Image (cartoon, rainbow, N blue to C red):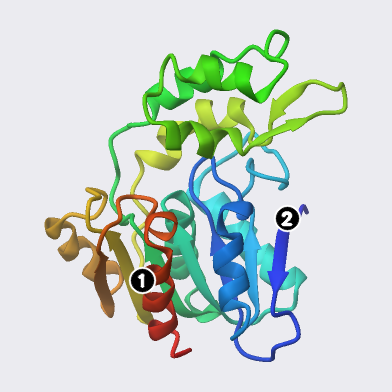
Amino acid sequence: MEILHSKIFGENLSSTPLLVFHGLFGMLDNWGSFGKDLGEFLPVHLIDLRNHGRSFHSESMSHDDLADDIANYMNHYGIEKAHLLGHSLGGKAVMQFAVKYPEKVEKLIVVDISPKAYPPHHQGVIKALESVDFNMANSRNDVEAVLSQYIPEKSTIQFLTKNLYWDDSKKLNWRFNLKTLSEKYTEFVSNAIKFGVFEGETLFISGERSNYILPQDEFGIKQQFPKAKIVIVKNAAHWVQAENPVDFANVVKQFLNLN
């Protein structure tokens, strides 16, 4: 059994730990400042999902797989109960975990995603990533030049190229497993979370300029997470924690009673 890769802050603190999961094509490094900040108050585990960052690669990528990875991680580290936070795809993972293993969750934080099925909307990004030929691209600039033919937003290109590294054959490569993420994309994006109920305290954080959580989604959210509160963070779109890190961290601290 393979265990997800992580970086731990505040390891010596005795309070309930917070486990943090990034979104699609992300990695734990995206959350470094947040982990350092909250690691002053409680143990914070920043974790790479399967097929991302430095975690193991697999041909399987269902919501159940992601939930079971979290259960295995907690067992490995002897964590009986934790606060869970997940952004986007990471949010799907922690929601699935909470309805499957409710006894292991103290408080749940879901960032800019809801339990519903979403229509596929990353085809442009996947096509761009698949267009990079690492036999030809020998530098970050080469990769950025290819991606910019498909992706107009510079911030998205910068986010994706954080995943570049030199592999054993001395070629640039992606840390994420593009083959599986592309092949299984509709399975983990276009499927809703399996029905189940988590009765514990739950916070949904939405970016003011994001359309991932709509007013009409509240009914579906409350059916599975009856204690859910929805908070909107101003001056932020989908990457709430990157676009307004101060307000985002304050909302999380308040919910976890860390202020």
In the image, what residue occupies the spot 36% across and 71% down? 247
In the image, what residue occupies the spot 76% across and 69% down? 76
**Identity of the residue furthest to the top in this view:** 136
User: Which label is found at residue 247?
Assistant: 1
Q: Disc 2 designates what residue?
A: 5
Q: Nearer the viewer, residue 123 or 12?
A: 12
Quarter the N terminus occupies: bottom right
User: Which label is found at residue 211?
Assistant: none
Q: Position of residue 69 (x, y in %)?
A: 63, 57
For marks 2 and 1, give the CA distance: 28 Å
In the image, what residue occupies the spot 79% across and 20% down? 171
Asked which secondary structure carries label 2, the reply is loop
250 relative to 233 in the view: left or right: right
Image quarter of residue 169: top right
231 relative to 71 in the view: left or right: left
Residue 36 vs 257, above or below: the answer is: above
In the image, what residue occupies the spot 43% across and 31% down? 154
Residue type, mark 2 in image:
His
Q: Position of residue 199 (x, y in %)?
A: 35, 80
Residue type, mark 1 in image:
Asp
Residue 201 vs 62, above or below: the answer is: below
Residue 41 vs 204, above or below: the answer is: below
Q: Position of residue 210 (x, y in %)?
A: 25, 50
Q: In this rendering, which labeled residue sits more in front, label 2 or label 1?
A: 1
Q: Position of residue 156 (x, y in %)?
A: 44, 35
9 relative to 97 in the view: left or right: right
Asked which secondary structure carries label 1, the reply is helix
Q: Nearer the viewer, residue 206 or 235?
A: 235
